[in-house]
Image (tube, rainbow, N blue to C red):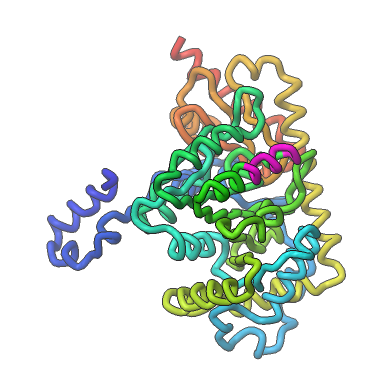
Amino acid sequence: MKPIAEQLNNVLKSENQHVLDMLSQLGKELFYPKGILSQSAEAKQSAHKFNATIGMATENGEMMHLDLIQKTLSDYEPKDLYPYAPPAGKPELRSEWRKKIIRDNPSLRDKTFGTPIVTNALTHGMSIAADLFVDHQDPVIVPDKYWGNYNFIFELRRGGRLNTFPLFNDQETFNVEGLREAVFAQKDHGKAVVVLNFPNNPTGYTPHEEEAEKIVSVLLEAAEAGMNIVAVTDDAYFKLFFEDSIKESLFSRLANLHPRILAVKVDGATKEEFVWGFRVGFITFASTSSKVVDALEQKATGLIRGTISSASHPSQTFVLKALQSPEFAEQQDEKCNIMKKRANKVKDVLNNNEKYRQLWSYYPFNSGYFMCLKLKEVNAEEARKHLLDKYGVGVVAINATDLRVAFSCVEEEDIEELFELIYQGVKDLSAVRS
């Protein structure tokens, strides 16, 4: 049990033993982590200069949004807002999102996969996948750079074991051999859940074509060796591809690949359509057998019915109308291009300042909302607090060495100043240490 959870339990024991006794084992193990959310909460109070902590995007001093959504909030009929949505989601939205998946991933056209089920955003979709496929001590394979919420979703809630491998090899490309070793280390267990999150949170990396082919080959090799592989693609930041990476989800390559590989796609409108608060996500299953897909969809729908009942109907309606609008693609591309320019500006700033290389390197990034600095001498958590307290700059400490910077939250013209302040803050600590 985590120390923070034990502290909370001790408080309950001293104040009211009965309440502690009422908790389930899961309840006893739950706690609020000192992670991105709490760091972002601190930044919200103190980051008076820049707040580059959380996975949202801003523009001109307000939350980034599509004009077509903002202008039409009063245009809906009551029937599209107030009734409960079906547990599996609004049928028209499910159908429209399936069409979108095929448009964005054309290699899926001739493959068999289901109709996306609506979830309460991506976290809920990942939790459904965990509930369906992760049992006590089941291995869940992720790179060492992963979204911290996986700890809650797979380990704390389900009792699975996160098995990590270095995301990058010595050539700073995706560590295919590390993935292979991690998968085959579980051969005796007979099953592994492999989570593929691209664009990656926190590094903002998406594999190139050759890397993607090798990833698929590793999972196919494992399946042919008799392992059952649940391949979950966490496509939270899909569409935000800025350079020479693959432009389709790995779900496209894994769908229908082998009877022992079950491809599960978890995605959502949250990041792609810049509607974080709408909480609309999807989970989609692929199999050559439509009966398998139907059975999995029924199980997932039953799980939704027994937890949240159904996702927000108004939010589903808003997203549906946006997808159906002739302006959607153009406005989405416009915002994606803004993000691309910010990413390119970050690289220009980092590559053109020799002094930065004395204090940090940075992990490859070519997509998404984020990038990560790898500090050479200073502890990342110490740097985070110092930047916040002295310079009013909020960033996220991922581990002892890595700082995650959300360039999605910083205007292009402010990026140079942001990194100059980060440099100054890290230099302060480095000077003290030396």
In this rendering, would 348 be left or right of 258?
right
Is residue 222 part of the magenta span, yes or no?
Answer: no
Is residue 266 in view from this perspective?
no
The stretch of residues the image draws in magenta is 208-217
Is 215 drawn above or below residue 390 in the view shown? Answer: below
At horizontal 62% and vertical 44% (from top left) the residue drawn is 200
Q: Report x, y in % for residue 46.
A: 50, 42
Answer above or below: position of 173 versus 431: below
Q: Quadrant of residue 427?
A: top right
Using the image as rendered, state which of residue 392 and residue 129 is in the foreground: 129
Using the image, determine if residue 363 lies above or below residue 63.
above
Residue name at image x 57 percent, y 49 percent: 224
Q: Residue at x 66, y 60 (%)?
A: 256
Give the image location of residue 198, x and y in percent: 64, 47
Q: Is residue 106 above or below residue 1?
A: below
Question: Farthest top residue?
Answer: 434
202 to the left or right of 429: right
Where residue 122 sits in the image (x, y, percent)? 56, 61
In magenta segment, residue 215:
yes
Count all numbered tags in the image, as a single digit. Answer: 0
Q: Quadrant of residue 209?
A: top right
Most foreground residue, 336 or 424 = 336
Check the image and name the residue furthest to the front.
Answer: 225
Foreground of the two, 245 or 414: 245
Taking 200 as reference, is 21 left or right?
left
